[in-house]
Every structure is written in structure tokens, then in C-alpha cells.
């Protein structure tokens, strides 16, 4: 289908983008990679009057290390995240997940910020952001703020972001003992179930764990039953198997669609939790 008519404006800076959003009075939408927004416009599920292109604002793109933390700009493409030497060294699970998104075309156009703002229930990054306890940085007319992943993802396609705010980037504390495992939908590669596990291990014992799932329900969620079962236990296969067997117990709104029934998804949450934990353990 053909989208409804819209104006196109290219923002020259972050503040320009915020000003253009404000001026549009709720009728404007930011355009980053366009890989979620444009399909929605073609289906007329989204009909913005103004598209504000932020893809070429230099300060919004790139991956850097600052004060022991890694910062990834909002318009950094999935490909850049997947192939970043810095991330592969300091926080490889973020690169792993990015490398599993869609196909080369999607990875070369789609962006981290666009994925987080759109918050598709089957998107990969949200589980990783939750498990890494990462911060999403936003800027709006009222200034700058940071939101933890736990508070950012609120419901299906719903995040803690005002309509005149822009995601500036994401900040993560480097964590190497982490794994992402995904059962992908064959055509699009979206997650039927995707699990990210991050372990804090010392002397062979798991001090604490953060485990999150995407694809299984309305939005990415922590698997606290798994996290609790891992804390304080030795890192071995028996611990992983016992914890993974509990995965999904607290999930209430399990998705069911043409790709997988709720019962199948629930079964896969356990399988992919075990695989994510095994990947994390292999990095310990
Ligand atoms: C064929 C296909 C397969 C795909 N497979 C996968 C997959 O396997 N896994 C996966 O996770 N995703 C998948 N995607 C989605 C893809 O990752 C998109 O790139 C992503 O969801 C949106 O990023 P974008 O940069 O294209 O955003 P856009 O489409 O440009 O924007 C999406 C939304 O976010 C808003 N937005 C964009 N940037 C910002 C910002 N900085 N601040 C605030 N709001 C912003 C826009 O206004 C819009 O509402 C797939 C997409 C396609 C077309």
C-alpha cells in the first residue's frame, strides 16, 4: 500500500530534532532506519504528518568507552553493533544479539534507538538491555534523563518516552559472562523466543544473575524465577538445568500466533534459557 501524504524534514542536530518534534504538535515521527516505521506507514497503521529524519546527526551514532562504561549512540546500525571490536571485547552479548537481527539489509539500515523506541514484542535488543541492566538515555525539551531498562519497557509497543523526546543512546557496564540464545521466525528472523543471560561469577559461584526473555509475551521481561534459582549456586550444568526448568513460570500473557502456540513458546522459553545460560557459562 501507499502511505498517506507526509512532509519530510532532515534534522541537523539533536536539538533541531527536538524542536521539530515540538513544532509538529504530536503529528511528527522520527525516522531512523525506517525498517519498522515505513512498513507501518505503508499499512496506514501509522500516519504521521511530518517525518523528521535523524539518521545523519553525527553525535547520535557511534560506539565509545567512557569512564569504564560503553555508550552506543541511538542511530548506530545493528551491523555496526554486531561488528564493533570494542563491544565484542567488552560486552560481546550485545554484538551477538545485533548479529541475529533480520538480514543484512535490515542490519545495515535498522538502528538501536529505533528498535528500542518501537519496542516490538519480538525484537532482540530489549531482552539484552534488561539483562545487562543498561540505561537508555533520552533528551527532550525538559532536558536529559536516563531510564533503566527495567522501567523503560512498559507494555506492548509502549516505553517510557514522551512524544517530544529522542533516544540519544544506551549506556552499559561491560559484562563478558553473558549469552543470548534465540529461536527465530524463519522469514523475518524476529524472535519467537529470545533469552539473554548475564552472570556475575566469582570463584566458580554465581553471585547474581539477570535473565530476560523477548518474544514470549507483550514485552521483554525478566525471568526472576531463573535469577533466584541461580544466585549463590556453583556454576555447573546441574545448576543451569535446574534453573532453566523453572523458566517461564512467572510469565502470564504468553503470546500465541501463526508462528507458535503459547504452549510451544513456554516450552521454548526453558530450552532457550538453558542455551543462553550455557553460552554465558562458556565465557566465565
Ligand atoms: C524484514 C525485517 C526483519 C526484521 N527482523 C528483526 C529481528 O530479527 N529482530 C529485531 O529485533 N528486529 C527486526 N526487525 C526490525 C528492525 O530491527 C528495525 O530496524 C527496528 O525495529 C527499528 O529501527 P529503525 O532504525 O529502522 O527505526 P524506524 O523504523 O526509523 O523507527 C521506528 C520507531 O522508532 C522511533 N524512533 C526511531 N529512532 C528514534 C530515536 N532515536 N528516539 C526516539 N524514537 C525513535 C520512530 O519514530 C518510529 O516510531 C526487522 C525488520 C524488518 C523490516
Image (cartoon, helix red, strand yellow):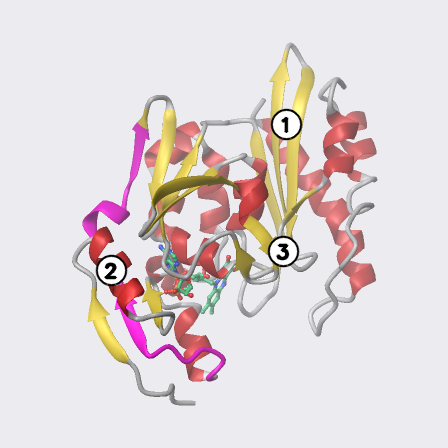
CA separation, marks 3 and 2? 30 Å
Which label sits on residue 219? 3
Question: Where's residue 239, x and y in %?
Answer: 78, 26
From the image, which quarter does the C terminus lie in? top right
Please tell me whether mark 3 sits on a helix, a strand or a loop.
loop
CA separation, marks 2 and 1? 47 Å
Residue 96 visible in the picture = yes
- For the residues bearing labels 1 and 3, Cβ distance under 8 angstroms: no
Magenta span contains residue 270: no
Which sits in the foreground, 131 or 104? Answer: 131
The residue identified by callout 2 is: 19
Which label sits on residue 187? none
Extent of the magenta region? 44-65
Question: Where's residue 21, x and y in %?
Answer: 30, 64
Q: Quadrant of residue 151?
A: top right
Residue 259 drawn above or below residue 70:
below
Which sits in the foreground, 158 or 128? Answer: 158
Which label sits on residue 281? 1
Amino acid at each position: 500500500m501507499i502511505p498517506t501524504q507526509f512532509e519530510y524534514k532532515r534534522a541537523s542536530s539533536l536539538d533541531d530534532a527536538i524542536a521539530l518534534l515540538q513544532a509538529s504538535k504530536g503529528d511528527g515521527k522520527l525516522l531512523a532506519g525506517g525498517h519498522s516505521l515505513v512498513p507501518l506507514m505503508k499499512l496506514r497503521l501509522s500516519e504521521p504528518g511530518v517525518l523528521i529524519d535523524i539518521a545523519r546527526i553525527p553525535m547520535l551514532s557511534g560506539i565509545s568507552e567512557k569512564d569504564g562504561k560503553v555508550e552506543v549512540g541511538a542511530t548506530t546500525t545493528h551491523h555496526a553493533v554486531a561488528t564493533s571490536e570494542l563491544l565484542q571485547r567488552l560486552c560481546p552479548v550485545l554484538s551477538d544479539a545485533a548479529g541475529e537481527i533480520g538480514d543484512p539489509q535490515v542490519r545495515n539500515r535498522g538502528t538501536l534507538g529505533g528498535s528500542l523506541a518501537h519496542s516490538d514484542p519480538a525484537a532482540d535488543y530489549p531482552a539484552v538491555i534488561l539483562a545487562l541492566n543498561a540505561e537508555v538515555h533520552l533528551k527532550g525539551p525538559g532536558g536529559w534523563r536516563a531510564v533503566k531498562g527495567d522501567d523503560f519497557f512498559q507494555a506492548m509497543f509502549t516505553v517510557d518516552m514522551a512524544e517530544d523526546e529522542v533516544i540519544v543512546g544506551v549506556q552499559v557496564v561491560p559484562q563478558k559472562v553473558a549469552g543470548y540464545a534465540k529461536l527465530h521466525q524463519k522469514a523475518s528472523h524476529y524472535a519467537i523466543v529470545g533469552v539473554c543471560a548475564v552472570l556475575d561469577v566469582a570463584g566458580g559461584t554465581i553471585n547474581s544473575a539477570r535473565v530476560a526473555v523477548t518474544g514470549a509475551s507483550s514485552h521483554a521481561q525478566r525471568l526472576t524465577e531463573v535469577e533466584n534459582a541461580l544466585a549463590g549456586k556453583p556454576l555447573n550444568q546441574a545448576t543451569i538445568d535446574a534453573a532453566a526448568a523453572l523458566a517461564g513460570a512467572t510469565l502470564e500473557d504468553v503470546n500465541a500466533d501463526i508462528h507458535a502456540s503459547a504452549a510451544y513458546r513456554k516450552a521454548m522459553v526453558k530450552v532457550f534459557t538453558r542455551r543462553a545460560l550455557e553460552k554465558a557459562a562458556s565465557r566465565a
